[in-house]
């Protein structure tokens, strides 16, 4: 078996992984503070202290970089919500406890890094027709995940009936609007977003 070739004690795989991470970290910083539209590939490379040749070995273009950051963030947020809800489901769990766990995990994840909030809810909007189609697919995935959580609630007796899939679509769109409003309004806090999301779920989607 051929041993991996090392350079300064590190394999090619390790160096490429580190290089990719540096590009992604730079994208989060620049897209999440200055904005996607005004951030060039050259700017990302300068921030990462890497070359454009190295950039194009990892990503097709700037939009591909944005989509990678967006997908990683959405995946992590979804995983946080699912894990929190699963932990909240106990033999004597109440609907409110489960809702607060899931909504709280979502808000906590994005509140921890406002740059990711800006990227996912502002900078990723209207980038291109292809990206809009991708965002629609991701929203559908969120809807499927929320529907699966609701099904678990029905199985455990926390919920009494199913939820119209179109209601999940409406809820996801409303969540996006509420988070953007919080970002743009200094008087609003994460607690305000939690309150509104809880109300929309309890009184609207879940009845």
Image: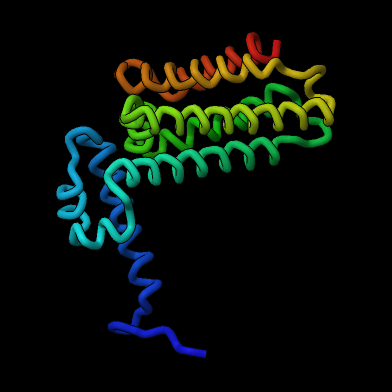
Q: Position of residue 24 (x, y in %)?
A: 33, 51
Is residue 10 left or right of 110 when viewed as pictured? left
Q: Is the image coloured rainbow, by chain, by secondary structure, or in one colour?
A: rainbow
- Residue at 35 percent of width and 58 percent of height: 21
| Residue at x-position 18% and y-position 43% | 40
Image coordinates of residue 41 in percent, x first then y, are 20, 47
Between residue 114 and residue 118, name the one nearer to us: 118
Indicate the position of residue 86 as horizontal and vertical percent values.
70, 39
Tell me where residue 13 appears, x and y as whole percent. 40, 72
Would residue 8 be found to the left or right of residue 177 on screen?
Answer: left
> With respect to residue 53, does 181 lie above or below?
above
Residue at point 18% right, 53% down?
Answer: 47
Determine whether, in the image, residue 20 is placed left or right of residue 108: left
Badge count: 0
- Identify the residue shown where x is 37% and y is 16%: 181
**Residue situated in front as seen by the camera: 80 or 192:** 80
- Quadrant housing the C terminus: top right
Front residue of 58 and 104:
58
Quarter assignment of residue 32: top left
- In the shown orientation, is residue 190 left or right of residue 207? left
């Amino acid at each position: 078996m051929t041993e991996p070739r090392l350079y300064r004690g590190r394999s090619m795989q390790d160096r490429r992984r580190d290089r990719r991470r540096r590009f992604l970290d730079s994208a989060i910083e620049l897209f999440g503070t200055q904005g996607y539209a005004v951030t060039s590939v050259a700017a990302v490379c300068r921030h990462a202290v890497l070359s454009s040749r190295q950039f194009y070995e990892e990503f097709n273009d700037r939009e591909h970089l944005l989509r990678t950051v967006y997908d990683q963030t959405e995946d992590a947020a979804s995983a946080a919500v699912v894990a929190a809800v699963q932990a909240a489901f106990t033999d004597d769990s109440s609907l409110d406890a489960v809702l607060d766990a899931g909504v709280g995990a979502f808000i906590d994840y994005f509140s921890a890094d406002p740059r990711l909030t800006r990227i996912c809810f502002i900078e990723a909007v209207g980038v291109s027709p292809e990206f809009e189609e991708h965002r629609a697919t991701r929203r559908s995935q969120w809807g499927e995940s929320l529907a699966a959580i609701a099904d678990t609630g029905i199985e455990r007796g926390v919920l009494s009936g199913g939820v119209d899939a179109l209601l999940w679509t409406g809820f996801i769109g409303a969540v996006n609007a509420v988070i953007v409003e919080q970002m743009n309004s200094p008087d609003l806090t994460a607690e305000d977003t939690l309150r509104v999301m809880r109300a929309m779920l309890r009184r609207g989607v879940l009845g």
